[in-house]
Image (cartoon, rainbow, N blue to C red):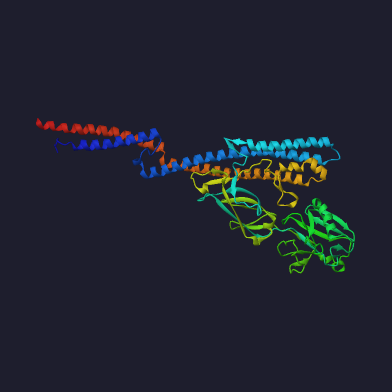
């Protein structure tokens, strides 16, 4: 073949040389960038998945920063609460010291009261000034807001977390299914132990409750009202109180019961000076309503009821209620629920807690709380809320004073139960109850925050870091260049380029051999 118009060998050599040059450029590009995929044509499917992973990585990286910031915020709040705990503990010590009236002068007790008042003021000051990045932490601005709470049914409501997915407010329905009860023993005024509300013979009773045990002696001819007064004088020592079954008719009988509600409460009454056979002296007059709900003491109680049994001891019962359809058993008059969508604690009014027939009470969580985005996607499943109530002294230590749900005191109001007042009355019960409740509230809040930081933020952060690590590794496998393989391919491309250049030169020279035919 001696055609020279078209140098086919040269064209072939040029084509392969161009391919080798492209291959060489590709290897140089990958080695210079460190990426196997630099543009879509390198690996379309790989580019798509790697970019999706990159989006996930950005979201996870920010979520890790969010959890770290949330942990810092919680830690800052908890440190302020720790200081409040210290103040409350100092108040406790001062109160215990002041109770030692035999060894402390009135001037010393007055000085202690000044320290207590100063500590209470400091608690409110910390509540108003604790901040994190411009956020007020303990003044109640991070607490949930409620609407429609009726004090005649729900005395106190504290929401810990709430989810407002697809709604601007969260409805909360509370339906008591099992009433709260006190341990109660009923004395029949018409039994042979008494006549028209007057004791027929002297007797000594051993009365025991959750606070302790005491023996009381009553003389013949004493009335039920006098018995009640004697029992109630020792309520702070026994945890037992007494009242007439029918306030308008003392002859009906009396009830001796625990001062508080709940399964931890009980009342025990035993006669210690008479025969052991209940049939001998009307001892069987001590009865309790074992199976029915706590009865109304308004004259409608009847000893002929089918559920009455002879007994000398009865335990109370905790309230049970449906909260948004979920059954929850509380403690005494308090009931709580904890779920991802709703966490709260309620103090139920006595009348509502003891009468399941009153139906459902409804209120609304309308907003508030602190919301933390702890996941890479903005969804309800990757957000958590946390409510931080105010710890101002006027709101801290809410306590049922004298067992009445209508009289809720607080640390600030507890100044009326001051050392001077307590010494005058010879009873620190109310002041101590308020202080103990305040200490419990702060300690429980600190515990909740610690559990939130450890079990929610901590575990989420570790999980996100593991995801970040694994996704980064996956993206690297897809997109990053393998330098060992690329350098090998680079060497191959360089050799092929050099040989291709030489071959192209030979192909161009081959056409000149036709000149020899021209002689």
Q: How many marks?
A: 0
Q: In screen coordinates, is 88 left or right of 205?
A: left
Q: Say which of 460 and 388 sits in front.
A: 388
355 over 487 or under it: above or below: below
Q: In screen coordinates, is 135 left or right of 275?
A: left
Q: Residue furthest top?
A: 519
Question: Looking at the rendering, which quadrant does residue 203 occupy?
Answer: bottom right
Q: Say which of 15 and 343 sits in front.
A: 343
Q: Residue furthest front?
A: 248
Residue 318 % position (x, y): 69, 57
For the N terminus, the quadrant is top left
273 over 487 or under it: above or below: below
Residue 163 % position (x, y): 55, 49
Q: Say which of 190 and 397 sits in front.
A: 190
194 over 49 or under it: above or below: below
Q: Say which of 296 and 58 sits in front.
A: 296
Residue 99 % position (x, y): 81, 42
Residue 388 % position (x, y): 61, 43
């Amino acid at each position: 073949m001696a055609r020279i118009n078209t140098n086919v060998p040269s064209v072939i050599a040029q084509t392969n040389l161009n391919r080798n040059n492209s291959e060489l450029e590709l290897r140089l590009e990958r080695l210079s960038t460190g990426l196997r995929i630099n543009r879509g044509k390198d690996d379309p499917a790989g580019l798509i998945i790697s970019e999706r992973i990159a989006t996930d990585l950005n979201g996870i990286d920010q979520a890790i920063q969010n959890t770290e910031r949330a942990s810092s915020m919680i830690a800052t709040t908890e440190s302020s609460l720790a200081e409040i705990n210290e103040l409350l503990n100092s108040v406790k010590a001062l109160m215990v010291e002041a109770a030692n009236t035999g060894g402390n002068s009135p001037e010393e007790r007055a000085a202690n009261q000044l320290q207590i008042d100063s500590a209470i003021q400091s608690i409110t000051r910390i509540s108003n000034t604790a901040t994190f990045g411009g956020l007020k932490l303990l003044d109640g601005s991070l607490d949930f807001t409620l609407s429609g709470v009726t004090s005649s049914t729900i005395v106190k409501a504290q929401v810990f977390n709430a989810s407002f997915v697809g709604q601007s407010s969260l409805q909360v329905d509370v339906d008591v299914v099992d009433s709260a009860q006190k341990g109660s023993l009923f004395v029949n005024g018409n039994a042979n132990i008494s006549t028209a509300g007057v004791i027929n013979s002297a007797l000594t009773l051993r009365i025991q409750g959750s606070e302790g045990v005491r023996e009381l002696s009553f003389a013949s001819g004493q009335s039920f009202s006098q018995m009640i007064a004697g029992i109630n004088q020792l309520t702070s020592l026994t945890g037992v109180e007494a009242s007439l079954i029918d306030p308008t008719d003392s002859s009906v009988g009396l009830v001796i019961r625990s001062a508080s509600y709940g399964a931890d409460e009980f009342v025990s009454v035993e006669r210690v000076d008479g025969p052991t056979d209940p049939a001998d002296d009307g001892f069987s007059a001590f009865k309790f309503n074992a199976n029915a709900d706590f009865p109304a003491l308004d004259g409608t109680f009847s000893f002929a009821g089918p559920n009455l049994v002879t007994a000398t001891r009865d335990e109370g019962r905790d309230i049970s209620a449906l909260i948004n359809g979920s059954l929850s058993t509380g403690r005494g008059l308090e009931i709580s629920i904890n779920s991802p969508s709703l966490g709260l604690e309620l103090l139920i009014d006595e009348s509502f807690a003891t009468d399941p027939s009153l139906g459902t009470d409804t209120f609304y969580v309308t907003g508030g709380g602190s919301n933390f985005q702890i996941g890479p996607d903005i969804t309800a499943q990757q957000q958590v809320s946390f409510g931080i109530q105010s710890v101002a002294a006027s709101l801290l230590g809410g306590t049922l004073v004298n067992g009445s749900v209508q009289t809720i005191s607080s640390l600030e109001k507890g100044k009326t139960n001051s050392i001077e007042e307590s010494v005058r009355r010879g009873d620190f019960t109310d002041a101590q109850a308020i202080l103990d409740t305040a200490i419990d509230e702060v300690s429980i809040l600190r515990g909740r925050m610690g559990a939130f930081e450890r079990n929610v933020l901590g575990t989420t952060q570790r999980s996100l870091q593991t995801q970040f690590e694994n996704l980064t590794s996956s993206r690297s496998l897809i997109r990053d260049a393998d330098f060992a393989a690329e350098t090998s391919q680079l060497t191959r491309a360089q050799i092929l380029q050099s040989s291709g250049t030489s071959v192209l030169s030979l192909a161009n020279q081959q056409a000149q051999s036709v000149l020899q035919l021209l002689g």
